[in-house]
Image: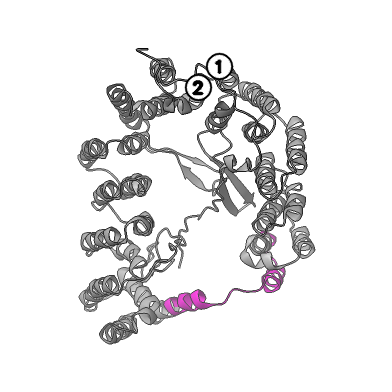
């Protein structure tokens, strides 16, 4: 049975670099310019300046940033900026629709959806005025409904976008989050719904359970490839009970307790659906996804043990499962039971996986299985030399370098989590991708400064990064490394921090169409017919964050550096970032 698996990205959060300053910070260069009035005037200037930008996405980004900063001070101006951004976003979607990009030029490589600017605006406004944001959302969705030719995939994407807005609001306004999530119930269910259940439960468990009940009613008659996205939450499971078109391992919140009441409600609907199909004949199908009969059997089988404490549900589940299996042909029965056996099969040791790969005569398939063993969890238990020996066995010379980089990167992460900074640094130094090495070195420097007041080791690490970047070609990767470098240097050497910030600006100016909108770095290993992908977030490696932190230490120097960008959108965004802390200063007017 074939399945389409959605790649669960390996997200590694870039820790707040401000924590580095466990020691004495250099005194901040306080500027007389850094006042609330100056910040307000500067923000309004950037709104006007945004109209000189040719790129619609860049223009929207600047408008949203300025509007967000102005909201508490000049709400009318802020709302006008939000409205201008939304009109631009609607027009952009009409012209281009949903847009994506591939992780590489390979046909099978991971497809990365680009943000829908309409929902980007709605998310930003909802943090300030959720009622108005929801009204805009309703109007937008109504226009979409009128397009009766909208494909199912488009409708699913709409639901996902609504749930992403809801997720952004959970911590600050759970009720508003539920309002947006409720809009998604008109569209096909997806794994994003389960993600939202768990996220909302961390903020308000009772509200999450009530919304789950609403979703259960909404999808009670939906196809099983939608309905079974509701199967994980009541039981506190990390995966769905069916063979879903897209899937992932859900992260269960700490302290989460399964709900017997919701389990019963879900199982009652599922069992009723089973009764409804048992009288219907089933035929073999070439459909990409299993028929409802098969999905029901998977769900009943996977949940059977978890309903044993309820005698009536346990009996009904066992009975329905047996009756379903009886109506299926022998081929389907073997397919189903084989899949369940695969689910329960223990993880094979690293050596077993490697031996199985080496027995294959097909070279490409052998390489694929070796890669799977190396990047899989079993390799973490093996020595470095052993894993490197297996990497050497890979036939395709184009696979070995990125695989080595992948291995060293994640082995360094493991050492870092174990506070073994010496080994972490040793592995990090072998990572060939500069942004990844810079990320690791800055994390190591962070940890080093937490445990000692001697800054020598941290300086050595930063000097090592600086040396690597100075030899590197001018790329976004190198620019991110320089921004992080400036950020950390400034914690104990202001002049060096400003110097590196200037170097970053000059490097970015040398790039053609610099784009820092994607705050993650893709790691990829690609053979001729297969690919493995992972990503880690790098929010510390962008101009806005770097300039915001630098501005707190040297306002005037950072403002000057921001004006040096030749890219007008970066000039506006970094200027706004530098003045952001000034909104907390006192007003100087009417004195």
Residue 580 in percent (x, y) is at 46, 27
Which region shows up in magenta? 335-364
Up the image or down, 297 lies above or below 495; here it is below
Callout 2: 10 Å neighbours few (<14), some, many (20+)?
Answer: many
- Give the farthest residue toward the top: 591
Q: Is residue 203 magenta?
A: no
Give x and y (percent) for residue 126: 30, 38
Can you say whether 450 is above or below 321 in the image? above
Q: Spatial distance from mark 2 to mark 1, Cα to Cα?
A: 8 Å
Determine whether, in the image, residue 261 is placed left or right of residue 562: left
Residue occupied by mark 2: 575
Seen in the image, is 444 located left or right of residue 66? right
Find residue 124 and report its horizontal and vertical position in percent. Answer: 35, 35
Name the image quarter holding residue 433: top right
Q: Is residue 384 above or below residue 546?
A: below
Give the main secondary structure, helix, strand or loop, of the magenta stretch: helix
Label 1 neighbourhood size at 10 Å, few (<14), some (14-19), many (20+)? some
Indicate how the structure is coloured in the image.
Answer: one colour
In this rendering, position of residue 374 left or right of residue 283: right
Residue 384 sits above or below residue 134 on the image: below
Q: Residue 325: percent from the left, percent from the top?
A: 34, 82
Nearest the camera: 289 or 238? 238
Q: Residue at x 57, y 18 (%)?
A: 556
Q: Which residue is mark 1?
A: 563
């Amino acid at each position: 049975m074939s399945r389409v698996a959605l790649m669960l990205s390996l997200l590694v959060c870039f820790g707040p670099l401000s924590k580095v300053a466990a020691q004495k910070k250099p005194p901040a260069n306080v500027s007389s310019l850094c006042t609330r009035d100056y910040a307000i005037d500067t923000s309004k200037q950037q709104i006007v300046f945004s109209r000189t930008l040719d790129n619609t996405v860049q223009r929207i980004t600047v408008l949203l940033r300025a509007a967000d900063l102005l909201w508490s001070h000049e709400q009318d101006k802020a709302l006008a900026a939000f409205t201008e951004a939304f009109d631009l976003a609607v027009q952009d979607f009409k012209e281009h629709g949903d847009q994506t990009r591939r992780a590489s030029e390979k046909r099978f490589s991971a497809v990365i959806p680009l943000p829908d600017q309409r929902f980007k605006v709605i998310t930003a406004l909802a943090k300030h005025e959720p009622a108005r944001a929801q009204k805009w959302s309703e109007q937008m969705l109504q226009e979409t409904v009128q397009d009766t030719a909208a494909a199912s995939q488009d409708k699913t994407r709409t639901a996902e976008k609504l749930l992403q807005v809801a997720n952004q609001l959970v911590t600050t306004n759970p009720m508003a989050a539920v309002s947006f999530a409720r809009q998604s119930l008109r569209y096909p269910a997806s794994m994003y719904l389960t993600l939202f259940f768990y996220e909302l439960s961390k903020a308000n468990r009772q509200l999450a359970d009530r919304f789950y009940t609403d979703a259960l009613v909404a999808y009670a008659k939906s196809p099983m490839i939608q309905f079974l996205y509701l199967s994980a939450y009541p039981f506190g499971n990390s995966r769905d009970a069916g063979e879903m078109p897209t899937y992932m391992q859900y992260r269960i919140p700490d302290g989460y307790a399964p709900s017997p009441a919701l389990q019963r409600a879900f199982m009652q609907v599922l069992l009723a659906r089973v009764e409804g199909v048992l009288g219907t004949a089933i035929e073999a199908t070439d459909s990409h996804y299993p028929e409802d009969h098969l999905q029901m059997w998977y769900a009943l089988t996977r949940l059977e043990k978890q309903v044993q404490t309820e005698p009536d549900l346990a009996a009904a589940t066992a009975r329905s499962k047996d009756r379903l299996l009886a109506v299926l042909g022998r081929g389907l029965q073997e397919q189903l039971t084989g899949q369940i056996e695969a689910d329960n099969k223990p993880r094979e040791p690293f050596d077993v996986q490697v031996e199985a790969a080496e027995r294959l005569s097909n070279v490409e398939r052998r390489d694929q299985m070796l890669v799977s063993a190396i990047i899989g969890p079993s390799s973490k238990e093996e020595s470095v030399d052993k894993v490197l020996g297996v990497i050497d066995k890979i036939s395709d010379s184009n696979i070995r370098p990125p695989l080595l980089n992948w291995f060293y990167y994640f082995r360094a992460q493991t050492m870092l989590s174990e506070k073994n900074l010496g080994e972490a640094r040793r592995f990090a130094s072998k990572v060939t991708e500069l942004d990844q090495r810079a990320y690791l070195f800055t994390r190591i420097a962070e940890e080093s400064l937490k445990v000692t007041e001697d800054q020598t080791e941290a300086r050595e690490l930063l000097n090592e990064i600086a040396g690597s970047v100075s030899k590197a070609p001018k790329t976004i990767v190198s620019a991110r490394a320089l921004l992080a470098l400036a950020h950390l240097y400034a914690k104990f050497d202001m002049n060096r921090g400003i110097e590196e910030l200037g170097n970053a600006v000059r490097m970015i100016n040398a790039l053609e169409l610099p784009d820092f909108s994607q705050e993650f770095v893709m790691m990829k290993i690609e053979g001729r017919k297969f690919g493995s992908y992972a990503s880690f977030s790098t929010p510390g490696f962008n101009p806005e964050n770097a300039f915001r932190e630098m501005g707190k230490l040297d306002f005037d120097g950072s403002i000057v550096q921001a004006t040096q960008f030749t890219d007008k959108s970066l000039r506006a965004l970094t200027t706004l970032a530098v003045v952001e802390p000034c909104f907390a200063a006192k007003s100087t007017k009417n004195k």
